[in-house]
Amino acid sequence: MTTESALPPLDPFAGIPDRRYEVKASDLLKPGNGGLLRWRRTATNAPIVYVEDAYITGTLDLRAADLKYLFRFERCRFEQPPDVREAHLLGLVFRKCWLPGLKARNMRSRNDVRLIRSVVQVDGADREIEETTVQRGDDRERGMPNAAVNLTDAVIEGSLVLTRTVIAHPHGKAIHADRLVLAGALLAYRMVANGEVRLPGLRTGGNVNFSGATLNNPDGFALNGNGLHIGGSLLCEVDNYGPASQRKRFSATGIMYLPSATVDSDIVLREAKLTVSQQGPIAVDAWKSNDPYLDPRPALVADRMRVDGNVELSDGLQALGTLRMVNARIGGSLRLAGAEVSVVRGKSQPYYDRALHLDGTEIGGDIEATSLRVPAGQLRLADVTVGGNFLAWNSMFRHPGRDVFSARRSKIAGNFQLTDATIHGTLRLQGVEVGGSINLAGTRLTEPGLRATSSFSLDIRTGRIGRDLTLRDNNGRPFVAEGGVNLDGAQVARRVDLRGSQLGSLSPFLVALDAGDVAADEFTLTPTVPPTGRVVLRRAHCGTLTDNEAFWAASGGIELEDFRYDALGKSIPLADDKALDHRIDLLSKAMRGYRPGPYDQLAHMLRAAGNEEHASTVALRKQQFRYEALAGGFKFFGPGVRLWSWLQRSMVGYGYRPVRALGWLFTLLVLGSLWFGLGSDDCVTWKSSDPAHEIIANGPRCVVNQQDTGLQWNPVIYTADLLVPIVDFGNKSRWYMHGPDNWVAAGFTASGWILATTVAAGVSRMLRREN
C-alpha cells in the first residue's frame, strides 16, 4: 500500500492529478485501514481528521452527520463539492485546496470554518447541467450549487476565515450566507470573489474584515449585507501584510449593499476602490424611474444604517458611483478626507448625478472632507444633523451648471469650514443652522447652477449662524463667487465678513450680493474690486458697518431701503467735513436715484453718536436731492421747484440752518434802511382842496394821513415792518410809497413772507425730528 511519504506534495491547482493521488470520498468514511489511507490523526489522539495531498473523487457526504471531529484538508482537490449540510462538526478547515463548491447550509461548527489560500470554482459547464436538471424538474441538488460557498443559516461558534481564497461562480453567487451566525469574526483578507457575496442577516460577535479583498460582480451586488449585524468593525481597507510593494487595497466592482446594517464599532474603507458599472440592467432600470430620490448607479447603499463608531471613506478611497447613506445614524465621525468620488453625469435628470447622498442622516461627530475630490457629481446633505464640525478645506467639487453641494435645512453643532476649496457649481446652504461659524475663506465658486428663481454661486438664505460668516481672502487667495452670494433672511450672531472678496453676477438677476433682511452684529463689506452686479441690503441691520469705496462702486448700484446700522467701523470726526461729503457722494452714486431712507439712517447714526452738526448736513443734502428729483419729474414746473429749493437752501438750509434766516433779515434790514433813508429830508408841504382829506406831503418819497401828522418817519422801522409778516408795527398802514419805492417795498414784503414760511417749515421739520 502506498504511503504519504512515497508521493511528492500535491499541487491541487494544476488540474486533475494522476491516479496515485485519488481517494474515493466514500473510503474516507469507512472504518479500518482503508479509511486511514489518506488521513492521519494527531499524536495526542485529538479528535482531528487530517487529510493532505489527495484528489478526493466522488462526494464527501457528511450531510446531517453528528461527528465530534475537526476535519482538516490540506493540499487536496475535490471532484465534487463537499456536502456538510445540517452537519454538526467540531470544525472544518480547507488549506490550499481546490473545490468545485461547498454545501454547508444549516451546518453547525463548534470551532472555526476556514478556507485558506484555497480556490472554490464553479465551472460554467456544470452550471449548464444544473439549469438542465432544474428544467426537467429533477432534484435541484443534483446539479451544481447556486452558490460556490453556501452557508445559509449556518452557525459557527468560532470564526469564518476566507484568507487569500478565490471563490468564483460565473452565473450565481460566490458566497450565499443568509442569516449566518458567527460567534467570532469573518476574516477574508485578500479574498477574491467573482460573483455576489451575499450576507443578509449576518450576525457576528467580532469584526468582518475584507481588507485587501477583491469583490467582483459588475452587474449586481458585490456585497449584499442587508440587515447584517456586526459585533465589531467592518474593515474593507488596505491589507498591509508583507513588504510595502505587496500592499493590496480593497476593491469592489458592483454595489456594496448595506441597508439597515448595524455595526457596533467602525466601518473602514480607507484606500478602497469602489466601482459600479455605468451600463447594465441596474442603471437601465433606474433611469426609467421617476423617483427623484433614487440613485441608479450607487457604489455604496447604506440607508438606515446604524454605526456606533466612525465611518471612514477616506485616505485615497476611489468611488465611481454614488455613496448613499440616507437616514443613517453614525455615532462617531464620517471621514471623507483625501477621497475621490465621481459619477457619470445625467443628461436630463439632474437628481441622478449625486456623488454623495446623505439625506436625513445623523452624525454624532464631525464630517471630515479635507482634500475631498468630486470631479463629477453632487454632494447632497439635506436635513443632515452633525454633532460636530464640517471640515473640508482644500477640496474640489465639480458639477457645473447645477447644485454641486446641497445641504438644505441641515444642522451643524460646530463650524462649517470649506476654505481654499474649488467649487464648480452652486453651494446651496439654504435654511442651514450652524452653531459656530461658516468659513469659506479663499474658496472659489464658479459655474453656478442656472435656475428660474436663482443663479447664485452661494445660497445661504434663511440660514442661522451662531458666530461668523466669513467670505474673505485667505493668505492672498480671494473668496470668489462668480454668480454672487444670496444671504436673504440669514441671521448671523456676530460678523458678516467679505474682506478681499470678489463678487460677480449672472443674468437674468444680476445680483452680486443679496443681504436683504440679514441681521448681524457687524458687516465688513470691503471687497478688493467693485461687485459686478447689484447689491441688496434691503431691511438688513447691523451694529457696526465697515466698508470701502469698492463696495459702494458696485456696477449695478446698491438697494439700501430700510438698511440700518448703529455705527461705522471708521467713524467720521466732528471736524472732518470732507469725509462726510465723501460718504454722501458714495450714497448718492450707489443708489442711482433719490431714496430718503439711507440719508435718514446716516443722519440718525451721526446724531446718536453726538455728531449733530454732520447729521444736520446730511438732512440738508437729503432735501436738496429730494427737490432735484421732484424737479426732474415735472416737465413744466421743474424750474420753479428748483428756484424754491434754492431759496430754502440759501435762506434757512431747509430749516436745518436757522441762523441763515437772521443773517438774511439783517441784510435786508440794512438794505431797506439805506434805500428808504436816502433823500428823506427833501420835503414839500401841500394841502388838498377837500379839508376832510387834507394830505401833508413830507417829501417826494412818502405820504402820511392828515390825522397822523405827529408820526415821525423812520426808514429802519418801516423796513422792519415790511419784512415781518402778520405782525404790524404801525408803519405799513400809515406810510405809502410811490414810484420805484413802491416796488421795492413790495419786494421786501415778499421776501419777509418767504423767510417766514421757510423758517416755519424748518421748525416743523425740527419738531418732528425731535419727536
Image (cartoon, grey):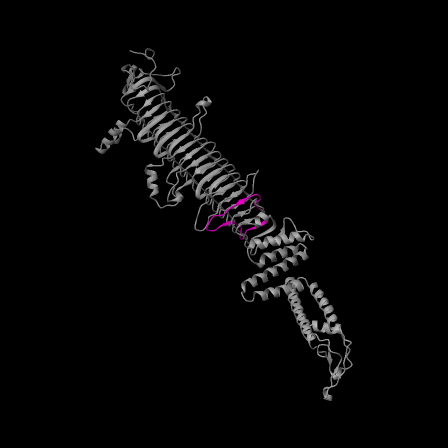
Q: Quadrant of residue 92?
A: top left
Vertical comparison of 43 with 486: above or below: above
Q: Nearer the viewer, residue 213 or 503?
A: 503
Left or right: 111 in relation to 61 = right
> In the image shown, does 378 or 64 lie closer to the viewer?
378
Report whether residue 518 is seen.
Answer: yes
Rendering coords of residue 409 (x, y %): 48, 47
- Taking the magenta stretch, the answer to whether it contains residue 67 is no
Task: Examine the structure image and report whether residue 511 is included in the region drawn in magenta.
Answer: yes
x, y percentage for residue 698?
76, 80
Residue furthest to the left:
136
- Magenta highlight range: 496-521
Location of residue 417 in the rendering, given as x and y in whole percent from the top left corner: 53, 40
**Pick the front one: 216 or 108:** 216
Residue 329 position (above or below residue 573):
above
Find residue 198 and report its horizontal and vertical position in percent.
36, 33
Residue 66 visible in the snapshot = no
Tell me the quadrant of the picture where the N terminus can be found: top left
Q: Is residue 582 left or right of residue 252?
A: right
Q: Quadrant of the C terminus?
A: bottom right
